[in-house]
Image: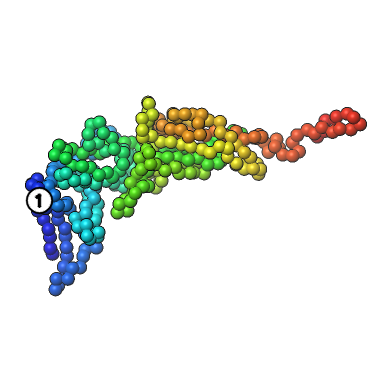
Amino acid sequence: MGNDYGHPDGHHDELYQARLQIYGQGGFYIGPVETPCFGREGSARSVGLLVHRANGETPDGNDFIKNYVCRFSDPNQEEPDYECWTPLGAGISTHPFLTLEEGECLWTNDDVLVPNYIEKFHHWNQDPNEYIFTNYQDFSILPTTDHLHSFLRDIHSATIRTDLISGGTGGTIKFKDPWLPDGAEKLEIHKNRGMDGAEWYPHNTSLVIQPNESDFYRGVFKDQGLPNWTPPYYRVRVEDPQPIDFHGQSTTWYFQGWQGSNVQFQYSNQLETGVAFTDDDAVAKAVFKGHPVSNTTSATSTNSQRKMVYQNGIYHNGL
């Protein structure tokens, strides 16, 4: 077994990485398949790493917190197999050694919150006036960098759907989530895109969002954007008009506005708007009116209207 190691004492050009290598008889390298790797070359700085739970607690070393923050390690760039995400541990007494004057890529691993999935990553904070909303981020470690903070927030359920006047629901709605990790990939971990880069995802008829690991969005945060619609926040959109079958006939439906319960809209009369979910089981509805539409089948059938019959110069009512 071979190793590389050094002392993280802050001296420049100090090597403080370790890599495990296993050799068989005769000195042939045989693995392992997943190579543990720690640190990198450079000058080390001890940085406090704190995770703040939604309830305000700052846990110290419990099972999920110590695996929650991971660091991207690439100790040998010529051999990509050594790349890995390494849990740093996080808590009141945790001060991992990070590389001074270099960018350190750190990731918040929301998967460790399952199965008690009641909160997820909300933002990083390196400076009291700084909010970073991407789940993995390159941090510049300066001589003045003392702490890095990761904040969790409670997550909640929500429903977004159409509401067809006299017709139930149907058509398509679109939703944009700045915290959805569907962007660039680093070792199979996708980065969320933030407010400016978030993608629109279409959903037929109704989108039900639940705070659990199997849900595509894994819950929503409350009150995002309020009170002054400060980014980031969620957005909803619909197309207008929309052709939707009604009582077996193709009907054109026209947008009337946004309504709902436990929600606030930035622009309730526009096709695209910011939306804030203010409590559990929030419902956001895009209201549409069809032309002509009635809630009874006979009202729009060919035999449902009186006819005028012209006979001998006189109009008569017909059935």
Name the foreground residue: 131 vs 155.
131
Quarter occupied by the N terminus: bottom left
What's the residue at 38%, 39% (across, down)?
196
What's the residue at 36%, 33% (across, down)?
231
Indicate the secondary structure of the residue bearing disc 1.
Answer: loop
- Asked whether the viewer can see residue 156, the reply is no
The x and y percentages for residue 179 are: 36, 41
Extreme residue in the top direction: 227
Residue 29 quadrant: bottom left
Q: How many marks?
A: 1
- Asked whether the viewer can see residue 15, the reply is yes
What's the residue at 37%, 26% (across, down)?
227
Q: How is the image coloured?
A: rainbow
In the image: residue 78, left or right of residue 118: left
Quarter occupied by the C terminus: top right
Extreme residue in the right direction: 312
The x and y percentages for residue 43 are: 12, 47
Extreme residue in the bottom direction: 26
What's the residue at 49%, 43% (across, down)?
203
In the image: residue 12, left or right of residue 200: left
Q: Residues within 10 Å of mark 1 (few under 14, many from 20)?
A: some
The x and y percentages for residue 223 are: 37, 30
The x and y percentages for residue 255 are: 56, 33
Residue 304 against residue 44 in the figure, above or below: above
Residue 130 quadrant: top left
Residue matched to label 1: 14
Amino acid at pointer 1 = Glu
In the image: residue 59, left or right of residue 270: left
Name the foreground residue: 319 vs 116.
319
